[in-house]
Amino acid sequence: MKKNYLMLSAALLLAGAAHAQGTELFFSEYAEGAHQSGQPYGGTTNSTGNERALEIFNPTNNTVNLNPYSVRRYSNGNTPIFQEEKVFRSNAAHVAVGTNSMNPRTTFVIACGQATLPAIVNSANQFCADYALAPAANNSVIVGGGPIYFSGDDAMALVRYPSGTAGVGNGVIVDLIGVIGEGPVLQSCAAGGNWSGTNPLDGTGTNAVYVASANQTIIRRASVSRGITVNPPKQNVPGSCPPVRAAGGYNIADEWYMYSTAFNGPGGASNPAGQLYDQLGNHNDYTGPYGTYQAVLSTLGKFDSNISVYPNPAHGTATVEIKDAKVGSVTVLNNLGQRISAEAKGQGQEKLQLNISSLKPGLYFVQIWSADGQTKIYKELTVE
């Protein structure tokens, strides 16, 4: 079976299929609470308003080393990485600190460092660093600590580094919640919206259930066995006010279902205390295939390091320089479908010129396939 391997530099988006099903870690639960700061919700102290957590699942038959992994936050529709932190088993109250790994068919929970609810605190394997904490030798921060302080309009990514150490070299996005580069808005067009949608599996018409990235605990559907490695099309038509759903736009309900919400039914009164988190720490309803862990990213690292795109930003033309790598094709992509393509000769040493004069200013991605069709990487290109 052909395997398509993908590489992305640390600040870029990833697109394409990374691994076969059941062979790579993915997000299995996401909790973004609506709790108010200073209110009692059953913890030993009043809530800080940061009752948030992410759960990671290992759908393989192998023990997986967590040292190459991180969690990233892309904030409010921006493409630069806002916060990133290494995945590190650090909550000694929940599990003994030792080998930083996940056993087969188990979960790993990263909670906000200010979470107070017992259901979150007691299930956490790791508490994220303080907000905006600088990287240091004694913490797990890669970029501005605290990615689990996310809100419903922040895209969240699970990342693996081919170097074997999170934060060293380039990272590969192996799962994604939300759309990097889209800041979903409220119906009033104000910032602070969320990604939402419905799925016929949950009901239709007046019985439809909205799945949302804010004020809900959501769980990955049982049949999902791999992460999203393609940055999805934007949920809404850019600039529409009130927001208009784009045809084929991102629908979080395709892969997630609403387990619990901070509201009393659709359109009901706010009830943060009613939101549940008691499924954190397990993904027992998983029905997908269990596979063999694919530790193949060294191939990606070598291919990626031998290809460069410049100048960046570019105007009129851009150059793809290839050194010691056999390339089959190069394509410039954006979400609107504008494309500039070039065929490489697969010689291992060549420069391709891309005429980008017809492209509008903005962020694009250069898709590069290897000559044998086994490896695919993406490079960021800003057009002026």
Image (cartoon, helix red, strand yellow):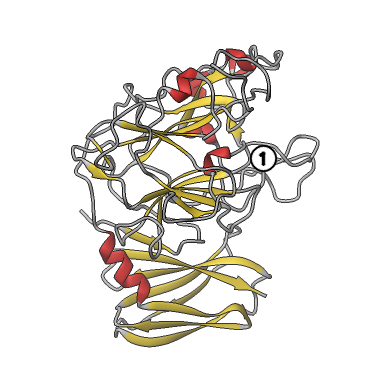
Amino acid marked by disc 1:
Arg
Q: Residue furthest bottom?
A: 350
Quarter of the picture containing the C terminus is: bottom right
Question: In front here: 343 or 364?
Answer: 364
Nearer to the camera, 318 or 159: 159
Res 96 quadrant in image: top left
Residue 122 visible in the shown view: yes
Task: Classify mark 1: residues with Cα within 10 Å, few (<14), some (14-19) or many (20+).
Answer: some
Q: Position of residue 57 (x, y in %)?
A: 34, 34
Task: Kindly identify the residue that appears in the image at 69 percent across and 47 percent down.
Answer: 237
Picture residue at 52% right of the left edge, 24% below the top:
217
In screen coordinates, is 148 left or right of 267?
left
Residue 264 percent location from the top left of the image = 65, 12
Check the image and report above or below for 45 versus 53. Answer: above
Q: Position of residue 230 (x, y in %)?
A: 46, 51
Q: Quadrant of residue 23?
A: top left
State whether residue 81 is above or below residue 286: below
Pointer 1: what residue? 245
Residue in the picture at 54% in, 47% down: 73
Q: Is residue 248 visible?
A: no
Q: Quadrant of residue 271?
A: top right
Q: Is residue 311 left or right of residue 307?
A: right
Q: Secondary structure at mark 1?
A: loop
Q: Nearer the viewer, residue 25 or 291?
A: 25
